[in-house]
Image (cartoon, helix red, strand yellow):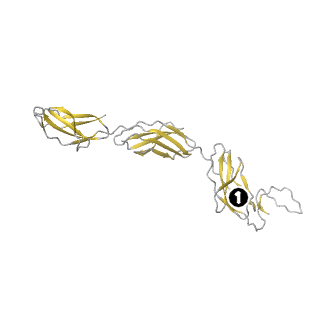
């Protein structure tokens, strides 16, 4: 409960006492809340609600004849800020490997801010993550790392009065696992009028499939197949000659179904249907050759045929 102390100057010498009146607005609704004995010049009004302004006036009275003096000037005072209630219902949701969304219930009316604190799974102390404006009830933490556990708590504050609420109950959440690394080194080689050989660099760590997507000039991306764990190539076959094609690949982790962002896009042009039957071909190493006939030797590099 709040209290307001009143004081005045006693200008009478024959009063029986002083009547103290109070109004919530200072204009109307005056009620007598108590009295002070003769020659007293102070009164304490207690049991008030916090966060409100009260107005007062005082007049002397004489019991013998029921006479009253005129009122003092009106004086007003603020009862004081209300204690801050702790936020409740703090919740945390992992949206991605780099974002956690938090929300809570604001239970105070006199705060002008909230302090959100966080402790990392490998940390040892609470640290201030951010100070938020009054009436805030949510925040998105974009400073987390994938696959890590974090703990949060929040409290209200009033920077004018210095009041601090108690902390909310803490909440623990783990950010989503890290995405697989994006495949690199994607290349595409035409090996016939209707086939394209795609290849990419070896993926780390192990345990990743590669999903292959293809796009026609006026079409959307669509998945056309996958290469198993450890494979570094894929042949797109039974195509129509003369097409202009786009390709990209994603790494896919079997253990949790997480997929990487797409690789860089490459464009491949198949030979025209009525063009010469020339295309790139990968040949194994040919070790035998005769004096009469020259045989081209390939170390896995393409040659025209």
Residue 288, quarter of picture: bottom right
Q: Taking 247 as reference, is 128 above or below it?
A: above
Which corner quadrant of the image does residue 215 belong to? bottom right
Q: As drawn, is 150 to the left or to the right of 39?
A: right
Q: Is residue 100 left or right of residue 18?
A: right
**Residue 238 picture location, percent across and down:** 75, 58
User: Is the N terminus in the top left, top right, bottom left or bottom right quadrant?
Assistant: top left
Question: x%, y% of residue 280?
Answer: 76, 61
**Mark count:** 1
Q: Nearer the viewer, residue 122 or 160?
A: 160
Q: Residue 131, image x and y in percent?
A: 43, 44
Task: Please say if 116 is above or below 200.
Answer: above
**Quick one: SS at disc 1?**
strand
User: Is residue 20 positioned above or below 261 on the image?
Assistant: above
Is residue 185 visible to us here? no
Residue 36 shows up from this direction? yes
Where 106 sits versus 272, above or below? above
Q: Nearer the viewer, residue 213 or 97?
A: 213
Q: Quadrant of the C terminus?
A: bottom right
From the image, tell me which residue sits under label 1: 188
Residue 77 occupies quadrant: top left
Residue for point 77% across, 61% down: 303
């Amino acid at each position: 409960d709040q209290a307001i102390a009143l004081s005045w100057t006693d200008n009478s010498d024959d009063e029986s006492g002083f009547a103290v009146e109070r109004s919530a607005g200072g204009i109307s609704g005056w009620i007598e809340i108590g009295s002070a004995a003769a020659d007293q010049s102070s009164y304490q009004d207690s049991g008030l609600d916090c966060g409100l302004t009260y107005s007062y006036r005082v007049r002397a009275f004489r019991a013998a004849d029921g006479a009253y003096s005129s009122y003092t000037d009106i004086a007003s005072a603020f009862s004081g800020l209300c204690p801050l209630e702790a936020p409740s219902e703090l919740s945390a949701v992992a949206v991605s490997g780099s974002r956690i969304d938090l929300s809570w219930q604001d239970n105070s009316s006199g705060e002008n801010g909230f302090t959100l604190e966080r402790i990392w799974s490998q940390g040892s102390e609470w640290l201030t993550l951010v100070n938020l404006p009054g009436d805030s009830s949510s925040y998105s933490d974009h400073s987390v790392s994938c696959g890590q556990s974090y703990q949060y708590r929040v409290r209200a504050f009033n920077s004018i009065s210095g009041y601090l609420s108690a902390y909310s109950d803490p909440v623990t959440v783990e950010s989503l696992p890290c995405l697989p690394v994006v495949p690199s080194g994607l290349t595409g080689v035409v090996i016939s009028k209707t086939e394209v050989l795609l290849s990419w660099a070896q993926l780390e760590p192990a345990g990743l499939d590669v999903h292959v997507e293809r796009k026609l000039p006026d079409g959307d991306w669509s998945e056309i197949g996958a290469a198993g764990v450890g494979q570094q190539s894929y042949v797109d076959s039974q195509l129509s000659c003369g097409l202009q094609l786009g390709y990209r690949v994603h790494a896919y982790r079997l253990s949790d179904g997480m997929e990487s962002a797409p690789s860089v896009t490459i464009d491949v042009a198949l030979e025209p249907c009525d063009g010469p039957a020339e295309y790139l071909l990968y040949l194994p190493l040919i070790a035998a050759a005769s004096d009469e006939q020259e045989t081209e030797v390939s170390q896995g590099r393409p040659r025209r045929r």
